[in-house]
Protein backbone atom coordinates (compact mmCIF):
# COMPACT_ATOMS: atom_id res chain seq x y z
CA UNK A 1 0.00 0.00 0.00
CA UNK A 2 2.88 2.35 0.83
CA UNK A 3 4.14 1.74 -2.71
CA UNK A 4 0.75 2.71 -4.10
CA UNK A 5 -0.40 -0.84 -4.88
CA UNK A 6 -4.19 -1.12 -4.79
CA UNK A 7 -4.90 -4.55 -6.30
CA UNK A 8 -3.07 -7.90 -6.03
CA UNK A 9 -3.96 -10.55 -8.62
CA UNK A 10 -2.68 -14.12 -8.25
CA UNK A 11 -3.46 -17.67 -9.34
CA UNK A 12 -4.37 -18.46 -5.76
CA UNK A 13 -4.26 -16.37 -2.63
CA UNK A 14 -3.32 -17.80 0.76
CA UNK A 15 -5.79 -17.34 3.64
CA UNK A 16 -3.76 -15.10 5.98
CA UNK A 17 -2.44 -12.97 3.10
CA UNK A 18 -5.93 -12.56 1.65
CA UNK A 19 -7.45 -11.61 5.00
CA UNK A 20 -4.59 -9.14 5.59
CA UNK A 21 -5.32 -7.51 2.22
CA UNK A 22 -9.05 -7.31 2.92
CA UNK A 23 -8.35 -5.88 6.36
CA UNK A 24 -6.05 -3.23 4.89
CA UNK A 25 -8.39 -2.23 2.10
CA UNK A 26 -6.17 -3.76 -0.60
CA UNK A 27 -8.20 -5.58 -3.27
CA UNK A 28 -7.35 -9.14 -4.33
CA UNK A 29 -8.55 -11.27 -7.20
CA UNK A 30 -7.72 -14.52 -9.00
CA UNK A 31 -9.26 -13.19 -12.22
CA UNK A 32 -6.41 -12.53 -14.66
CA UNK A 33 -8.82 -11.01 -17.19
CA UNK A 34 -8.90 -7.98 -14.92
CA UNK A 35 -5.29 -7.15 -15.82
CA UNK A 36 -6.03 -6.04 -19.39
CA UNK A 37 -9.16 -4.20 -18.29
CA UNK A 38 -7.20 -2.29 -15.63
CA UNK A 39 -4.43 -1.55 -18.15
CA UNK A 40 -7.05 -0.24 -20.56
CA UNK A 41 -8.15 2.21 -17.88
CA UNK A 42 -11.58 0.62 -17.45
CA UNK A 43 -13.42 1.40 -14.25
CA UNK A 44 -13.91 -1.89 -12.37
CA UNK A 45 -16.92 -2.19 -10.07
CA UNK A 46 -16.14 -3.11 -6.46
CA UNK A 47 -18.65 -5.94 -6.80
CA UNK A 48 -16.09 -7.77 -8.99
CA UNK A 49 -13.91 -8.08 -5.87
CA UNK A 50 -16.71 -9.01 -3.47
CA UNK A 51 -18.36 -11.65 -5.68
CA UNK A 52 -18.54 -14.99 -3.89
CA UNK A 53 -17.50 -13.53 -0.54
CA UNK A 54 -19.65 -13.92 2.56
CA UNK A 55 -21.73 -11.02 3.90
CA UNK A 56 -19.18 -9.88 6.51
CA UNK A 57 -16.22 -10.04 4.13
CA UNK A 58 -18.22 -8.09 1.53
CA UNK A 59 -18.84 -5.35 4.08
CA UNK A 60 -15.19 -5.31 5.21
CA UNK A 61 -14.10 -4.83 1.58
CA UNK A 62 -16.72 -2.16 0.97
CA UNK A 63 -15.78 -0.27 4.14
CA UNK A 64 -12.19 -0.20 2.87
CA UNK A 65 -10.76 -2.43 5.59
CA UNK A 66 -11.37 -4.12 8.91
CA UNK A 67 -10.59 -1.11 11.07
CA UNK A 68 -13.23 1.20 9.53
CA UNK A 69 -15.62 -1.79 9.52
CA UNK A 70 -14.97 -2.43 13.22
CA UNK A 71 -15.47 1.23 14.08
CA UNK A 72 -18.85 1.07 12.32
CA UNK A 73 -19.57 -2.26 14.04
CA UNK A 74 -18.96 -0.81 17.47
CA UNK A 75 -21.26 2.06 16.59
CA UNK A 76 -23.94 -0.50 15.67
CA UNK A 77 -23.94 0.68 12.04
CA UNK A 78 -23.18 -2.62 10.32
CA UNK A 79 -25.27 -5.72 9.92
CA UNK A 80 -23.74 -8.95 11.22
CA UNK A 81 -25.73 -11.85 9.81
CA UNK A 82 -26.67 -14.27 12.60
CA UNK A 83 -25.46 -17.88 12.53
CA UNK A 84 -28.68 -19.86 12.26
CA UNK A 85 -27.31 -23.39 12.06
CA UNK A 86 -29.60 -25.80 13.83
CA UNK A 87 -28.35 -28.47 16.22
CA UNK A 88 -26.15 -31.04 14.45
CA UNK A 89 -23.40 -33.51 15.20
CA UNK A 90 -20.19 -31.47 15.39
CA UNK A 91 -16.46 -32.03 15.26
CA UNK A 92 -14.33 -30.96 18.22
CA UNK A 93 -13.25 -27.81 16.38
CA UNK A 94 -16.84 -26.92 15.56
CA UNK A 95 -17.87 -27.38 19.19
CA UNK A 96 -15.14 -25.01 20.39
CA UNK A 97 -16.09 -22.43 17.77
CA UNK A 98 -19.79 -22.78 18.64
CA UNK A 99 -18.95 -21.83 22.21
CA UNK A 100 -16.92 -18.80 21.05
CA UNK A 101 -18.76 -17.27 18.09
CA UNK A 102 -20.23 -13.92 18.93
CA UNK A 103 -23.97 -13.63 18.50
CA UNK A 104 -25.00 -11.08 15.89
CA UNK A 105 -27.06 -8.74 18.02
CA UNK A 106 -25.26 -8.39 21.31
CA UNK A 107 -21.78 -9.45 22.21
CA UNK A 108 -22.92 -10.41 25.70
CA UNK A 109 -25.84 -12.59 24.61
CA UNK A 110 -25.93 -16.40 24.79
CA UNK A 111 -23.25 -18.00 22.59
CA UNK A 112 -24.08 -19.70 19.32
CA UNK A 113 -25.25 -23.27 19.93
CA UNK A 114 -24.25 -24.93 16.66
CA UNK A 115 -22.08 -24.10 13.67
CA UNK A 116 -21.23 -25.70 10.36
CA UNK A 117 -18.41 -25.21 7.86
CA UNK A 118 -18.91 -22.00 5.91
CA UNK A 119 -20.61 -20.09 8.75
CA UNK A 120 -18.96 -16.69 9.19
CA UNK A 121 -18.67 -14.27 12.03
CA UNK A 122 -16.38 -13.12 14.81
CA UNK A 123 -14.93 -15.51 17.35
CA UNK A 124 -14.06 -14.41 20.85
CA UNK A 125 -10.42 -15.18 21.54
CA UNK A 126 -9.06 -16.26 24.90
CA UNK A 127 -5.39 -15.54 24.22
CA UNK A 128 -3.64 -13.38 21.63
CA UNK A 129 0.10 -13.29 21.04
CA UNK A 130 2.62 -11.83 18.65
CA UNK A 131 6.39 -11.75 18.23
CA UNK A 132 8.92 -9.09 17.31
CA UNK A 133 8.43 -9.58 13.57
CA UNK A 134 4.79 -8.48 13.77
CA UNK A 135 4.16 -6.58 17.03
CA UNK A 136 5.92 -3.39 15.84
CA UNK A 137 3.83 -2.98 12.69
CA UNK A 138 0.60 -3.81 14.53
CA UNK A 139 1.53 -1.33 17.29
CA UNK A 140 2.19 1.41 14.72
CA UNK A 141 -1.27 0.76 13.21
CA UNK A 142 -2.69 0.94 16.74
CA UNK A 143 -0.95 4.16 17.65
CA UNK A 144 -1.89 5.83 14.36
CA UNK A 145 -5.52 4.71 14.28
CA UNK A 146 -6.49 4.37 17.92
CA UNK A 147 -3.94 6.37 19.90
CA UNK A 148 -0.80 5.64 21.88
CA UNK A 149 -2.45 6.31 25.21
CA UNK A 150 -5.61 4.31 24.61
CA UNK A 151 -5.44 0.98 26.47
CA UNK A 152 -5.76 -2.23 24.44
CA UNK A 153 -8.75 -4.46 25.16
CA UNK A 154 -7.76 -6.74 28.09
CA UNK A 155 -3.95 -6.51 28.15
CA UNK A 156 -3.87 -9.45 30.58
CA UNK A 157 -4.75 -11.90 27.79
CA UNK A 158 -2.09 -10.64 25.35
CA UNK A 159 1.50 -11.90 25.22
CA UNK A 160 4.53 -10.67 23.29
CA UNK A 161 7.68 -12.64 22.45
CA UNK A 162 11.21 -11.73 21.47
CA UNK A 163 12.23 -15.00 19.83
CA UNK A 164 12.92 -14.78 16.12
CA UNK A 165 16.00 -12.60 15.82
CA UNK A 166 17.83 -12.98 19.15
CA UNK A 167 20.94 -14.50 17.53
CA UNK A 168 20.80 -12.67 14.22
CA UNK A 169 23.99 -10.68 14.89
CA UNK A 170 26.00 -13.93 14.98
CA UNK A 171 25.18 -14.97 11.41
CA UNK A 172 24.19 -11.84 9.47
CA UNK A 173 26.59 -11.03 6.62
CA UNK A 174 28.71 -7.88 6.56
CA UNK A 175 26.91 -6.91 3.37
CA UNK A 176 23.50 -7.06 5.08
CA UNK A 177 24.87 -5.21 8.07
CA UNK A 178 26.04 -2.44 5.73
CA UNK A 179 22.51 -2.29 4.32
CA UNK A 180 21.34 -1.50 7.87
CA UNK A 181 19.35 -4.73 8.30
CA UNK A 182 20.76 -5.54 11.74
CA UNK A 183 19.84 -2.05 12.94
CA UNK A 184 16.33 -2.50 11.57
CA UNK A 185 16.02 -5.86 13.35
CA UNK A 186 17.08 -4.15 16.59
CA UNK A 187 14.43 -1.50 16.03
CA UNK A 188 11.79 -4.26 15.92
CA UNK A 189 12.84 -5.44 19.35
CA UNK A 190 12.89 -1.92 20.78
CA UNK A 191 9.48 -0.99 19.37
CA UNK A 192 7.95 -4.17 20.84
CA UNK A 193 9.50 -3.43 24.25
CA UNK A 194 8.20 0.14 24.15
CA UNK A 195 4.62 -0.87 23.25
CA UNK A 196 4.60 -3.66 25.86
CA UNK A 197 5.67 -1.20 28.55
CA UNK A 198 3.23 1.48 27.44
CA UNK A 199 0.30 -0.98 27.41
CA UNK A 200 1.27 -3.18 30.37
CA UNK A 201 1.49 -6.29 28.18
CA UNK A 202 3.55 -9.28 29.34
CA UNK A 203 6.67 -9.61 27.15
CA UNK A 204 8.72 -12.80 27.15
CA UNK A 205 11.94 -11.10 26.15
CA UNK A 206 15.67 -11.64 26.14
CA UNK A 207 17.58 -13.03 29.11
CA UNK A 208 19.12 -10.48 31.45
CA UNK A 209 22.31 -12.36 32.27
CA UNK A 210 23.22 -14.12 29.00
CA UNK A 211 22.35 -14.14 25.33
CA UNK A 212 19.12 -15.91 24.43
CA UNK A 213 15.34 -15.67 24.71
CA UNK A 214 12.97 -16.73 27.46
CA UNK A 215 11.39 -18.96 24.86
CA UNK A 216 9.91 -19.38 21.41
CA UNK A 217 6.30 -18.15 21.36
CA UNK A 218 4.70 -21.54 20.63
CA UNK A 219 6.82 -23.37 23.20
CA UNK A 220 5.89 -20.92 25.98
CA UNK A 221 2.21 -20.81 24.96
CA UNK A 222 2.02 -24.61 25.29
CA UNK A 223 4.01 -24.86 28.51
CA UNK A 224 2.39 -21.95 30.30
CA UNK A 225 -0.83 -20.54 28.89
CA UNK A 226 -3.07 -22.39 26.42
CA UNK A 227 -5.93 -24.47 27.87
CA UNK A 228 -8.29 -27.10 26.43
CA UNK A 229 -11.40 -25.66 24.81
CA UNK A 230 -9.91 -22.20 24.25
CA UNK A 231 -9.52 -20.18 21.07
CA UNK A 232 -5.98 -18.80 20.74
CA UNK A 233 -4.64 -16.60 17.95
CA UNK A 234 -1.04 -15.71 17.17
CA UNK A 235 0.93 -13.75 14.63
CA UNK A 236 2.58 -16.87 13.28
CA UNK A 237 1.61 -19.73 11.01
CA UNK A 238 2.69 -22.34 13.57
CA UNK A 239 0.19 -21.10 16.17
CA UNK A 240 -1.66 -24.49 15.80
CA UNK A 241 1.15 -25.93 17.98
CA UNK A 242 -1.01 -25.64 21.12
CA UNK A 243 -3.84 -27.60 19.48
CA UNK A 244 -2.02 -30.52 21.11
CA UNK A 245 -3.75 -29.57 24.33
CA UNK A 246 -7.21 -29.59 22.74
CA UNK A 247 -7.80 -25.96 21.82
CA UNK A 248 -8.35 -24.14 18.55
CA UNK A 249 -5.29 -22.05 17.69
CA UNK A 250 -4.61 -20.38 14.38
CA UNK A 251 -2.31 -17.85 12.79
CA UNK A 252 -3.52 -14.37 11.93
CA UNK A 253 -1.96 -11.50 10.00
CA UNK A 254 -0.72 -8.19 11.36
CA UNK A 255 -4.01 -6.42 10.63
CA UNK A 256 -6.01 -9.01 12.55
CA UNK A 257 -3.53 -8.77 15.44
CA UNK A 258 -4.03 -4.99 15.56
CA UNK A 259 -7.83 -5.23 15.35
CA UNK A 260 -7.94 -7.98 17.99
CA UNK A 261 -6.25 -5.58 20.43
CA UNK A 262 -9.33 -3.37 20.04
CA UNK A 263 -12.15 -5.92 19.81
CA UNK A 264 -10.75 -9.10 21.44
CA UNK A 265 -12.28 -11.08 18.59
CA UNK A 266 -11.26 -12.26 15.13
CA UNK A 267 -13.21 -12.68 11.90
CA UNK A 268 -13.48 -16.33 10.78
CA UNK A 269 -15.16 -18.51 8.21
CA UNK A 270 -15.75 -21.88 9.85
CA UNK A 271 -13.41 -24.45 8.26
CA UNK A 272 -14.14 -28.05 7.34
CA UNK A 273 -12.29 -30.78 9.26
CA UNK A 274 -10.19 -33.70 8.06
CA UNK A 275 -9.82 -36.63 10.43
CA UNK A 276 -6.47 -38.41 10.35
CA UNK A 277 -6.60 -41.69 12.22
CA UNK A 278 -3.35 -43.52 12.95
CA UNK A 279 -4.09 -46.99 14.20
CA UNK A 280 -1.83 -49.57 15.80
CA UNK A 281 1.50 -49.31 17.53
CA UNK A 282 4.50 -47.41 16.23
CA UNK A 283 8.03 -48.79 16.03
CA UNK A 284 10.31 -47.58 18.85
CA UNK A 285 12.39 -45.45 16.43
CA UNK A 286 9.31 -43.77 14.93
CA UNK A 287 8.09 -40.48 16.33
CA UNK A 288 5.35 -37.91 15.75
CA UNK A 289 7.67 -36.25 13.23
CA UNK A 290 7.70 -39.40 11.11
CA UNK A 291 3.88 -39.51 11.27
CA UNK A 292 3.54 -35.92 10.09
CA UNK A 293 6.15 -36.31 7.33
CA UNK A 294 4.18 -39.35 6.17
CA UNK A 295 0.92 -37.35 6.22
CA UNK A 296 2.58 -34.50 4.29
CA UNK A 297 3.63 -36.95 1.59
CA UNK A 298 0.07 -38.21 0.94
CA UNK A 299 -1.56 -37.30 -2.38
CA UNK A 300 -4.56 -35.78 -0.60
CA UNK A 301 -2.27 -33.27 1.14
CA UNK A 302 0.16 -32.72 -1.74
CA UNK A 303 -2.67 -31.94 -4.13
CA UNK A 304 -3.85 -29.15 -1.82
CA UNK A 305 -7.13 -30.78 -0.79
CA UNK A 306 -6.37 -30.26 2.91
CA UNK A 307 -5.75 -26.52 2.53
CA UNK A 308 -7.53 -24.31 5.08
CA UNK A 309 -9.07 -27.30 6.86
CA UNK A 310 -8.78 -28.40 10.48
CA UNK A 311 -6.55 -31.48 10.89
CA UNK A 312 -8.00 -33.59 13.68
CA UNK A 313 -5.51 -36.30 14.66
CA UNK A 314 -6.88 -39.43 16.34
CA UNK A 315 -6.38 -43.18 16.72
CA UNK A 316 -4.46 -45.46 19.03
CA UNK A 317 -1.01 -44.33 17.88
CA UNK A 318 -1.85 -40.64 18.40
CA UNK A 319 -3.41 -41.35 21.80
CA UNK A 320 -0.14 -43.02 22.80
CA UNK A 321 1.83 -39.83 22.07
CA UNK A 322 2.67 -37.31 24.80
CA UNK A 323 1.40 -33.72 24.54
CA UNK A 324 4.91 -32.61 23.43
CA UNK A 325 4.87 -35.13 20.59
CA UNK A 326 1.29 -34.30 19.58
CA UNK A 327 2.45 -30.67 19.33
CA UNK A 328 4.89 -31.66 16.57
CA UNK A 329 1.88 -32.79 14.54
CA UNK A 330 -0.41 -29.86 15.35
CA UNK A 331 2.47 -27.41 14.71
CA UNK A 332 3.03 -28.89 11.26
CA UNK A 333 -0.62 -28.48 10.30
CA UNK A 334 0.95 -25.26 8.97
CA UNK A 335 3.04 -27.25 6.46
CA UNK A 336 -0.14 -29.04 5.37
CA UNK A 337 -1.61 -25.57 4.76
CA UNK A 338 -4.38 -26.42 7.22
CA UNK A 339 -6.39 -23.93 9.26
CA UNK A 340 -5.16 -25.66 12.40
CA UNK A 341 -4.43 -29.02 13.99
CA UNK A 342 -6.07 -30.47 17.08
CA UNK A 343 -6.12 -33.58 19.25
CA UNK A 344 -9.04 -34.29 21.62
CA UNK A 345 -7.83 -33.72 25.19
CA UNK A 346 -7.50 -36.89 27.27
CA UNK A 347 -5.60 -38.31 30.24
CA UNK A 348 -2.28 -37.31 28.60
CA UNK A 349 -3.43 -33.66 28.66
CA UNK A 350 -4.58 -34.00 32.27
CA UNK A 351 -1.16 -35.35 33.25
CA UNK A 352 0.63 -32.62 31.27
CA UNK A 353 -1.32 -29.84 33.00
CA UNK A 354 -0.78 -31.36 36.45
CA UNK A 355 2.94 -31.92 35.87
CA UNK A 356 3.82 -28.76 33.94
CA UNK A 357 1.38 -26.23 35.42
CA UNK A 358 0.54 -27.65 38.83
CA UNK A 359 -3.19 -27.59 38.03
CA UNK A 360 -5.71 -29.65 39.98
CA UNK A 361 -6.99 -32.88 38.35
CA UNK A 362 -10.65 -32.12 39.09
CA UNK A 363 -10.37 -28.68 37.48
CA UNK A 364 -8.82 -30.10 34.29
CA UNK A 365 -11.27 -33.00 34.06
CA UNK A 366 -14.15 -30.53 34.23
CA UNK A 367 -12.48 -28.37 31.57
CA UNK A 368 -12.14 -31.23 29.06
CA UNK A 369 -15.64 -32.64 29.58
CA UNK A 370 -17.39 -32.98 26.21
CA UNK A 371 -14.29 -31.88 24.27
CA UNK A 372 -14.49 -34.60 21.64
CA UNK A 373 -16.05 -34.92 18.22
CA UNK A 374 -19.56 -36.31 18.03
CA UNK A 375 -19.75 -39.83 16.67
CA UNK A 376 -21.64 -38.72 13.54
CA UNK A 377 -19.67 -35.53 12.95
CA UNK A 378 -19.03 -34.75 9.28
CA UNK A 379 -15.53 -34.62 7.83
CA UNK A 380 -14.33 -33.47 4.43
CA UNK A 381 -12.11 -36.58 4.44
CA UNK A 382 -11.10 -39.36 6.79
CA UNK A 383 -7.56 -40.65 6.30
CA UNK A 384 -6.48 -43.89 7.96
CA UNK A 385 -2.88 -44.95 8.48
CA UNK A 386 -1.31 -47.96 10.14
CA UNK A 387 1.52 -46.96 12.51
CA UNK A 388 3.22 -50.32 12.01
CA UNK A 389 3.76 -49.53 8.31
CA UNK A 390 5.61 -46.29 9.03
CA UNK A 391 9.39 -46.38 9.41
CA UNK A 392 11.68 -43.34 10.03
CA UNK A 393 11.26 -40.69 7.36
CA UNK A 394 13.02 -37.67 5.93
CA UNK A 395 11.68 -34.90 3.73
CA UNK A 396 14.27 -34.30 1.01
CA UNK A 397 15.40 -30.70 0.37
CA UNK A 398 12.96 -28.13 -0.94
CA UNK A 399 9.62 -29.03 0.59
CA UNK A 400 8.25 -30.73 3.73
CA UNK A 401 6.00 -32.75 1.40
CA UNK A 402 9.03 -34.56 -0.11
CA UNK A 403 8.68 -37.39 2.41
CA UNK A 404 10.65 -40.60 1.91
CA UNK A 405 11.46 -43.57 4.11
CA UNK A 406 15.15 -43.41 5.03
CA UNK A 407 15.55 -47.03 3.96
CA UNK A 408 14.38 -45.99 0.48
CA UNK A 409 17.09 -43.32 -0.02
CA UNK A 410 19.04 -44.41 -3.09
CA UNK A 411 22.48 -43.63 -1.76
CA UNK A 412 24.22 -42.74 1.48
CA UNK A 413 23.69 -39.02 2.27
CA UNK A 414 26.67 -37.56 4.20
CA UNK A 415 25.83 -34.51 6.32
CA UNK A 416 27.83 -31.53 7.57
CA UNK A 417 25.30 -29.96 9.96
CA UNK A 418 22.71 -31.51 12.26
CA UNK A 419 20.26 -29.20 14.01
CA UNK A 420 17.85 -30.08 16.82
CA UNK A 421 15.70 -27.25 18.07
CA UNK A 422 12.92 -24.75 17.14
CA UNK A 423 9.32 -24.74 18.31
CA UNK A 424 8.80 -28.11 16.62
CA UNK A 425 11.76 -29.96 18.11
CA UNK A 426 13.00 -27.98 21.11
CA UNK A 427 10.53 -29.39 23.67
CA UNK A 428 11.23 -31.53 26.74
CA UNK A 429 10.49 -34.79 24.95
CA UNK A 430 12.67 -33.78 21.99
CA UNK A 431 15.53 -33.31 24.47
CA UNK A 432 14.75 -36.80 25.85
CA UNK A 433 15.28 -38.11 22.32
CA UNK A 434 18.55 -36.27 21.58
CA UNK A 435 19.83 -37.35 25.00
CA UNK A 436 18.87 -41.00 24.61
CA UNK A 437 20.67 -41.27 21.26
CA UNK A 438 23.78 -39.42 22.44
CA UNK A 439 23.91 -41.38 25.72
CA UNK A 440 23.70 -44.53 23.63
CA UNK A 441 26.51 -43.29 21.43
CA UNK A 442 28.72 -42.53 24.43
CA UNK A 443 27.97 -45.98 25.82
CA UNK A 444 29.25 -47.46 22.55
CA UNK A 445 32.35 -45.23 22.62
CA UNK A 446 31.01 -42.95 19.90
CA UNK A 447 30.54 -39.18 19.69
CA UNK A 448 29.18 -36.71 17.13
CA UNK A 449 31.01 -37.43 13.87
CA UNK A 450 34.09 -35.30 13.30
CA UNK A 451 32.59 -34.24 9.97
CA UNK A 452 29.42 -32.91 11.55
CA UNK A 453 28.51 -29.87 13.65
CA UNK A 454 25.51 -30.78 15.82
CA UNK A 455 23.56 -27.88 17.33
CA UNK A 456 20.96 -28.44 20.03
CA UNK A 457 18.83 -25.41 20.85
CA UNK A 458 16.15 -25.33 23.56
CA UNK A 459 12.67 -24.10 22.75
CA UNK A 460 12.35 -22.39 26.12
CA UNK A 461 14.05 -21.80 29.43
CA UNK A 462 11.68 -24.34 30.96
CA UNK A 463 13.10 -26.97 28.60
CA UNK A 464 16.64 -25.82 29.37
CA UNK A 465 15.97 -26.23 33.10
CA UNK A 466 14.42 -29.65 32.47
CA UNK A 467 17.49 -30.72 30.47
CA UNK A 468 19.76 -29.46 33.23
CA UNK A 469 17.84 -31.40 35.91
CA UNK A 470 17.99 -34.56 33.82
CA UNK A 471 21.73 -34.23 33.19
CA UNK A 472 21.20 -33.88 29.44
CA UNK A 473 23.40 -30.81 28.98
CA UNK A 474 26.36 -32.80 30.23
CA UNK A 475 25.54 -35.66 27.83
CA UNK A 476 25.14 -33.26 24.89
CA UNK A 477 28.45 -31.56 25.56
CA UNK A 478 30.31 -34.80 26.28
CA UNK A 479 29.10 -36.20 22.97
CA UNK A 480 30.35 -33.08 21.15
CA UNK A 481 27.09 -31.22 20.46
CA UNK A 482 26.91 -27.41 20.74
CA UNK A 483 24.15 -26.36 23.13
CA UNK A 484 22.44 -23.01 22.61
CA UNK A 485 19.90 -20.86 24.45
CA UNK A 486 16.33 -20.56 23.11
CA UNK A 487 15.52 -18.63 19.93
CA UNK A 488 14.16 -19.42 16.46
CA UNK A 489 17.70 -19.02 15.17
CA UNK A 490 18.75 -21.27 12.31
CA UNK A 491 15.13 -22.08 11.46
CA UNK A 492 14.86 -18.66 9.83
CA UNK A 493 18.48 -18.18 8.85
CA UNK A 494 19.05 -16.10 11.96
CA UNK A 495 21.28 -18.09 14.27
CA UNK A 496 23.98 -20.75 14.67
CA UNK A 497 23.35 -23.92 12.70
CA UNK A 498 22.57 -22.26 9.36
CA UNK A 499 24.22 -23.53 6.21
CA UNK A 500 26.60 -21.24 4.36
CA UNK A 501 27.20 -23.04 1.04
CA UNK A 502 24.71 -24.45 -1.49
CA UNK A 503 26.25 -27.94 -1.47
CA UNK A 504 26.24 -28.20 2.34
CA UNK A 505 23.89 -30.95 3.54
CA UNK A 506 21.93 -30.34 6.73
CA UNK A 507 19.59 -32.60 8.67
CA UNK A 508 17.20 -30.75 10.94
CA UNK A 509 14.28 -31.52 13.23
CA UNK A 510 12.60 -28.20 12.34
CA UNK A 511 9.31 -28.02 10.45
CA UNK A 512 10.05 -26.61 6.98
CA UNK A 513 12.84 -26.80 4.43
CA UNK A 514 11.85 -24.38 1.71
CA UNK A 515 14.83 -23.32 -0.44
CA UNK A 516 16.98 -20.73 1.31
CA UNK A 517 14.98 -20.65 4.56
CA UNK A 518 17.86 -21.82 6.75
CA UNK A 519 20.75 -20.85 4.49
CA UNK A 520 21.71 -21.90 0.95
CA UNK A 521 22.36 -25.60 1.80
CA UNK A 522 20.41 -28.80 1.16
CA UNK A 523 18.15 -29.29 4.17
CA UNK A 524 16.55 -32.65 5.04
CA UNK A 525 13.79 -32.74 7.66
CA UNK A 526 13.71 -35.62 10.13
CA UNK A 527 12.78 -36.62 13.67
CA UNK A 528 14.92 -35.76 16.71
CA UNK A 529 15.99 -39.44 16.92
CA UNK A 530 17.08 -39.48 13.27
CA UNK A 531 18.85 -36.10 13.54
CA UNK A 532 20.88 -37.22 16.57
CA UNK A 533 21.69 -40.67 15.13
CA UNK A 534 22.75 -39.08 11.83
CA UNK A 535 24.95 -36.57 13.68
CA UNK A 536 26.81 -39.52 15.21
CA UNK A 537 26.98 -41.57 12.00
CA UNK A 538 27.96 -38.61 9.79
CA UNK A 539 25.27 -39.52 7.26
CA UNK A 540 21.50 -39.98 7.32
CA UNK A 541 20.49 -43.12 9.23
CA UNK A 542 17.58 -44.59 11.14
CA UNK A 543 18.16 -44.78 14.87
CA UNK A 544 18.34 -48.27 16.34
CA UNK A 545 17.19 -48.18 19.97
CA UNK A 546 19.54 -48.83 22.84
CA UNK A 547 19.50 -52.59 23.09
CA UNK A 548 20.83 -52.98 19.55
CA UNK A 549 24.40 -54.17 19.39
CA UNK A 550 25.36 -51.30 17.11
CA UNK A 551 23.94 -47.78 17.35
CA UNK A 552 23.29 -47.40 13.70
CA UNK A 553 21.17 -49.25 11.18
CA UNK A 554 22.51 -48.70 7.69
S1 LIG B 1 11.20 -21.83 15.44
FE1 LIG B 1 10.91 -21.57 13.24
S2 LIG B 1 8.86 -22.31 12.80
FE2 LIG B 1 9.00 -22.03 15.02
S3 LIG B 1 8.21 -19.96 15.39
FE3 LIG B 1 10.40 -19.78 15.13
S4 LIG B 1 10.73 -19.35 12.96
FE4 LIG B 1 8.64 -20.12 13.18
Image (tube, rainbow, N blue to C red):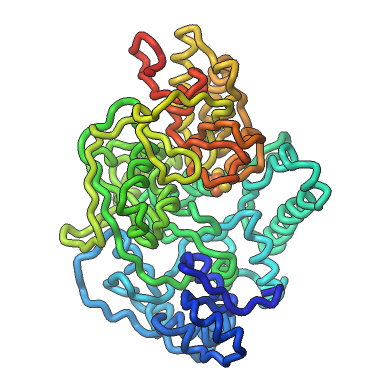
Residue at the image position 31 percent from the left and 64 percent from the top: 272
Is the N terminus in the top left, top right, bottom left or bottom right quadrant?
bottom right
Horizontal side, residue 167 vs residue 363: left or right: right
Horizontal side, residue 348 vs residue 358: left or right: left
Residue 70 in sight from this viewpoint: no
Task: Tell me where residue 211 appears, x and y as whole percent.
Answer: 71, 36
Task: Tell me where residue 105 appears, x and y as whole percent.
Answer: 40, 85
Question: Which residue is at the far top?
Answer: 445
Tell which of 347 and 509 is nearer to you.
509
Tell which of 66 and 349 is nearer to you.
66
User: Is residue 1 placed above or below 215 in the rendered structure?
Assistant: below
Residue 478 in sight from this viewpoint: yes
Q: Quadrant of residue 254?
A: bottom right
Tell which of 62 and 80 is nearer to you.
62
Task: Tell me where residue 368 appears, x and y as whole percent.
Answer: 30, 52
Residue at the image position 59 percent from the left and 63 percent from the top: 155
Amino acid sequence: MCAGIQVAIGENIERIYKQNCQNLGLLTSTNFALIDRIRAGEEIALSEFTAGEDEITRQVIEYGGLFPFNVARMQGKVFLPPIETSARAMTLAEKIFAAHMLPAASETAVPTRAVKPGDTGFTRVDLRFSHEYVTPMASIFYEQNVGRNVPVNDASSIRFFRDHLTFLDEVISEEKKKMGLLDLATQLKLKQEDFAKQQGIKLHGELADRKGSEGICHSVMLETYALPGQVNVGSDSHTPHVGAIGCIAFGIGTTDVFNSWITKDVRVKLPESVKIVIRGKRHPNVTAKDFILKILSLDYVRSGKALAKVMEYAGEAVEALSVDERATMTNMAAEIGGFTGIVAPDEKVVEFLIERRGMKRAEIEKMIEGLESDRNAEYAQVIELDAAEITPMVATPGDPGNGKYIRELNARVPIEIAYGGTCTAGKNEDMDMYASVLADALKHGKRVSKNVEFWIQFGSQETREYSKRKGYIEIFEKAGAHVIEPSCGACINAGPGVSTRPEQVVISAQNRNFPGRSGPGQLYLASPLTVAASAVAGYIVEYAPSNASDLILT
